[in-house]
């Protein structure tokens, strides 16, 4: 809750120096020290302060991203080569899912589209139509990112300078600690001040209930007008101080533990340009390839697996020897009941956590910052701003939640109690409708500006074993000859491009080599 403050925003305080804290600091540094263009010609510079505690540390995971993250860095004028080199970064074209629909299955959820629309009809409908008429080509050959990932190739659209070829959509794999350090240097250079210390007390205004100041362990105080809570799972301000409440989604997303463990690539192979998510008996394992190592982790449900077994499965399925001690993490899937409460905006793990399965957490930090910056008025905080922020964020969470549940629910796996639970659990009505429409005739409606595209939904539905029972009736009206020409042209362009691309490892060495770790 909280009413309109009518109090000018002159001091913004960020609590936490993990990925969320430094992303927020870097973005907000664009207004740091600038004079607020407030009502009546008010001129007051905005001070931005970030407090973090080295003793508490950060969660230390979160290394796979999705394409809007590239835009976040571009908007901050960050040089891609410099950043990737500083964070041992690699390119990511999608996620490979192994053993999800059934044991032995494998598919890629790519970042780009399958083919392109013909006369307003999405490509997967045309593909299905042709398949019904005997064309045996799998849909994957019509997607550039899938084919490049399959052959371990990479190039950026700018490299091939051909407007007639499909663009390459990509994201990054990053070393999370190095990325936070990179953004810290960026933000401090632009006027953000950093305070080291543990917040011991949160003081609230007796009248409004807003957060007024933080008291550090050494007794010093930090006052603020707007607070950004990036304190991780504990939600120091949003939960511990404001008691906002948490909506749990464990019944749909039952994994609640993870063990993370980096390793070398013992065979010296180049990093593949994709994340791998391999399903196990009671959860799944990630492999995130960086230039100098792989990030690995096993996400599992404690109701079905002990920590020791999860650790052993992880170690048995890594590409090399561990380079650190295992990091065991606990979480509860769900979201805060409000993301902006009083004068506190929660970002990152303080706002909620669903699953690392589709690398959506850093993305939600990014969109949270975008919404905050778009709504922010330096004249004060209003209930209208808060409720817009909360409504929009809530929708984003729910759409992503449904997409994640799909991976667990649409499976034929019956080899463990965990998969039997997931396969037979009831799911949100919004997801049931999506699956039924796709089964009927491949229709996918994107709702509420949702993140995942038609290709994303189609790739995961088909990859998980949901077959299209038909296709859009408009596909029948498109002349056979025209469709054949378009479809063949797409496949040939993709084959030509991939054949002429360098290997991903070679590309990294040329474009953004990282110094030895
Ligand atoms: C197992 C797992 C895998 C993940 N994988 C991915 C992925 O592949 N892709 C992705 O997008 N996301 C992933 N995530 C999510 C991602 O890790 C987080 O979104 C991201 O790291 C942001 O974390 P954070 O900054 O919110 O919290 P944290 O990293 O926990 O940082 C919290 C900060 O708050 C500070 N702090 C806390 N309390 C106090 C206090 N009292 N006083 C002072 N400072 C304090 C800490 O010192 C720290 O600086 C994953 C998460 C988990 C759990």
Image (cartoon, rainbow, N blue to C red):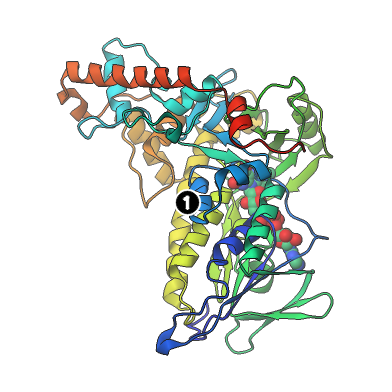
Left or right placement of residue 420 versus residue 257 in this view:
left
Q: Position of residue 121 (x, y in %)?
A: 24, 32
Q: How many marks?
A: 1
Q: Position of residue 409 (x, y in %)?
A: 52, 34
Q: Quadrant of residue 475?
A: top left
Q: Position of residue 210 (x, y in %)?
A: 60, 81
Q: Quadrant of residue 257?
A: top right
Q: Is residue 161 visible?
A: yes
Left or right placement of residue 472 versus residue 50 in this view:
left
Residue sitting at x 41%, y 90%: 40
The one nearer the camera, 252 or 6, is 6
Which image quadrant shows ligand 1?
Answer: bottom right
- Location of residue 166 with respect to 494 vertically, above or below: below
Left or right placement of residue 436 versus residue 308 in this view:
left
From the image, tell me which residue sits under label 1: 398
Residue sitting at x 69%, y 67%: 236
The one nearer the camera, 279 or 127, is 127
Q: Is residue 332 visible?
A: no
Left or right placement of residue 456 versus residue 324 in this view:
left
**Quadrant location of the C terminus in the rendered image:** top right
């Amino acid at each position: 809750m909280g009413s309109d403050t009518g109090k000018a925003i002159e001091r913004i305080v960020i609590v936490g120096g993990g990925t969320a804290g430094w992303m927020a600091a870097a973005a907000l540094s664009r207004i740091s020290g600038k004079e607020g263009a407030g009502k009546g010609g008010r001129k007051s510079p905005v001070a931005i302060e970030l407090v973090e505690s080295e003793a508490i540390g950060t969660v230390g995971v979160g290394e796979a991203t999705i394409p809007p993250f590239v835009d976040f860095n571009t908007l901050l004028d960050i040089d891609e080569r410099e950043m990737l080199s500083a964070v041992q970064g690699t390119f990511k074209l999608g996620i490979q899912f192994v053993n999800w629909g059934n044991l032995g299955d494998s598919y890629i959820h790519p970042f780009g589209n399958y083919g392109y629309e013909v006369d307003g009809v999405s490509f997967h409908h045309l593909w299905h139509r042709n398949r019904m008429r005997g064309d045996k080509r799998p849909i994957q050959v019509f997607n550039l990112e899938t084919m490049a990932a399959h052959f371990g190739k990479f190039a950026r659209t700018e490299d091939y300078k051909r407007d007639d070829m499909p663009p390459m959509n990509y994201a990054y794999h990053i070393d999370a600690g190095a990325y936070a350090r990179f953004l810290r240097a960026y933000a401090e250079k632009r006027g953000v001040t950093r305070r080291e210390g543990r917040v011991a007390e949160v003081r609230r205004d007796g009248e409004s209930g807003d957060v007024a100041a933080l008291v550090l362990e050494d007794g010093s105080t930090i006052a603020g007008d707007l607070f950004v809570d990036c304190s991780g799972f504990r939600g120091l301000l949003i939960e511990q101080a404001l008691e906002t409440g948490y909506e749990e989604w464990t019944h749909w997303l039952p994994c609640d533990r993870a063990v993370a463990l980096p390793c070398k690539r013992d065979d010296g192979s180049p990093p593949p340009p994709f994340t791998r998510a391999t399903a196990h008996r009671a959860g799944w394992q990630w492999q995130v390839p960086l230039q100098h190592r792989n990030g690995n982790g096993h996400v599992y449900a404690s109701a079905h697996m002990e920590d020791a077994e999860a650790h052993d499965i992880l170690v048995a399925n890594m590409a090399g020897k561990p380079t650190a001690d295992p990091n065991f993490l606990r979480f509860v899937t769900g979201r805060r009941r409000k993301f902006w409460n009083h004068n506190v905006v929660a970002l990152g793990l303080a706002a909620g956590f669903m699953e690392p399965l589709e690398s959506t957490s850093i993305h939600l930090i990014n969109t949270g910052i975008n919404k905050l910056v778009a709504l922010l008025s330096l004249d004060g905080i209003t209930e209208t701003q808060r409720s817009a922020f909360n409504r929009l964020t809530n929708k984003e969470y729910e759409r992503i939640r449904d997409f994640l549940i799909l991976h667990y629910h649409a499976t034929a796996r019956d080899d463990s109690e965990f998969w039997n639970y997931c396969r037979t659990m009831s799911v949100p009505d919004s997801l049931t409708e999506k699956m039924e429409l796709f089964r009927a005739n491949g229709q996918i409606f994107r709702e509420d500006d949702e993140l995942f595209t038609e290709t994303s939904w189609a790739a995961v539905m088909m990859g998980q074993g949901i077959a299209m029972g038909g296709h859009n009736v408009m596909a029948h009206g498109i002349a056979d000859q025209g469709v054949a020409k378009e479809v063949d042209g797409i496949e040939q362009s993709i084959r030509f491009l991939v054949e002429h691309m360098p290997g991903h490892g070679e590309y990294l060495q040329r474009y953004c080599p990282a110094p030895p770790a």
